[in-house]
Image (cartoon, grey):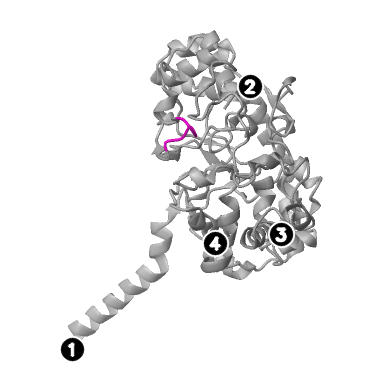
Amino acid sequence: MNNEQNILFKLMGACIIFIIVFAPSVAFTQQGKIISSYGPTNQTETFDQIKRARMAVKSERAKQHLEMLNSRYDLSKKTTVELIMSGGKPIPIGPTANLRGVTWEQLNKMTPEQIKEKGIFPYKPLPFPDHAEGGMLFPVMITKLLSRLVRFDLDFDLPEHILPDPAPAIYLTTRPDLGDIAKGRLITIDNYYEIFNGILNPKQLEGLRLLVTQFPQQQFNATEDRRTDNHDGMLGVTCFDCHANGHSNGATHLVGDIRPQEFRHRIETPTLRGVNIQRLFGSQRAMKTVEDFTEFEQRAAYFDGDHVMAAKKGVNVLERGSQVHFMAEFMAILDFPPAPKLNIYGKLDQTKATPSELRGEALFNGKAQCASCHPEPYYTDNSMHDLKAERFYKQELANGMMMAHDGNIKTFPLRGIKDSPPYMHDGRCFTLEDIVEYFNLIQQLDLKSEEKKDLVAFMRAL
């Protein structure tokens, strides 16, 4: 090798070393920090050290989050005994959004650009209680019943009166004659068999058993990197811990398919009622079957989309041909609650509906354009839509979350919608009144006060 070749070889080697050592830092550096797609896979801290670090910031971050919630919403309890969910819990009444020096009528007249410039859009994306931390987080009404779901580092943020029933009613497509099978009971591994034996076939019963069986999860597992100090909590969580009784209890977490962390969306647990008529699953992932969704939840959502951490913490890989199939077979018979004012076509029976509900139905199918995405009989088009809500607010960091674009979101069915507060994929709208105000602004409908009330009355009848 001559001298020129030797020099060239050394230069090439130096370049290769530079690329290997320094390129990742350059390519994935944002505002002076390394951005990684992975969690801390090489854990060097003990459980006690991790717990101390988390507890040291708990109260201050909770205070900051509560201040943000109080600045955006009126969190006081507003319900009436005349309006109840199918399980008997009073329905929250709104709107709850705090307006910043304007009225709803004034907002109706403003352009998206004007609202954005003034920073007065009342329904910005909702951050997680500690957005940098994330993970599954359960309402107090559930942790009182299931203490294994308590996290030492975070407390749930939303008040109980805007959440679903803690033990929702259960209706089956196969046995509508039975009505509510739950009868105020929360279905768990301790009681599922005695309640459903003789009602379900063996596959459905086995599927239900799997749905109420604990499996390791990112925050609830046996490793040092967990967020529970409850021995039973170390065994993991169940599907029905979030989807209580096949419905929802308002439990929240962050979607696993977005990075970096501040761009991840908070997600509010959707109901499993009516999955038999749905053709898309997941708020944005557009999975095509409930079997795909079931498999995905165990493999990815349980572990924030990090398969490396999943392998460490004990991912439960479900067997598609039997376990996934059995779970899906049970979920597919979870029915919407009865709607006695709807006829066989999913429209209001004019002999049973009130004048306000009938006016609301006309608005729903007409001026308000709701039916464009929510056609009867189940009030979903089984598609996805981008509302482009970012027209109304600036992209800025709020409590660790970037107020960025929502993108395409699945059209969820509106049947039984009164049972499922809070609303939107991240729960930013606490009541049906909030939903009407949100879409009135987003679609620039200029609805009048009485028209808004009529729309709410109609949706409560669905």
Q: Give the quarter of the image for residue 446.
A: top left
Earlier residue among tags 4 and 1: 1
Q: Is residue 7 magenta?
A: no
- Mark nearer the viewer, 2 or 4: 4
Residue 374: image location, x then y, percent: 45, 30
Q: Which mark is residue 96?
A: 2
Does the magenta run of residues contain 377? yes
Foreground: disc 2 or disc 3: 2
Decide: few, some or many residues near mark 2? Use Cα within 10 Å; few <14, some 14-19, many ≥20: many
Circle 3: element type: helix
In the picture of the structure, the residue carrying the numbered disc 3 is 50
Between the residue at mark 3 and the residue at mark 1, the CA separation in whole angstroms equals 57 Å
The answer to whether residue 302 is seen in the rendering is yes
Q: Relative to 461, does residue 218 appear above or below in the rendering?
A: below
State how far apart marks 3 and 4 are (Cα). Answer: 38 Å
Spatial CA span between label 2 and label 4: 41 Å
Name which residue lies at 41% across and 22% down.
Answer: 369
At label 2, the amino acid type is: Thr
SS category of the residue bearing label 2: loop
According to the picture, the residue beneath numbered tag 4 turns out to be 325
The CA span between labels 2 and 3 is 37 Å
Q: Earlier in the sequence, mark 3 or mark 4?
A: 3
**Which residue is nearer to you in this view: 194 or 78?**
194
Secondary structure of residue under mark 1:
loop
Kindly identify the amino acid type of the residue bearing the numbered disc 1: Asn
Mark 1, residue position: 2
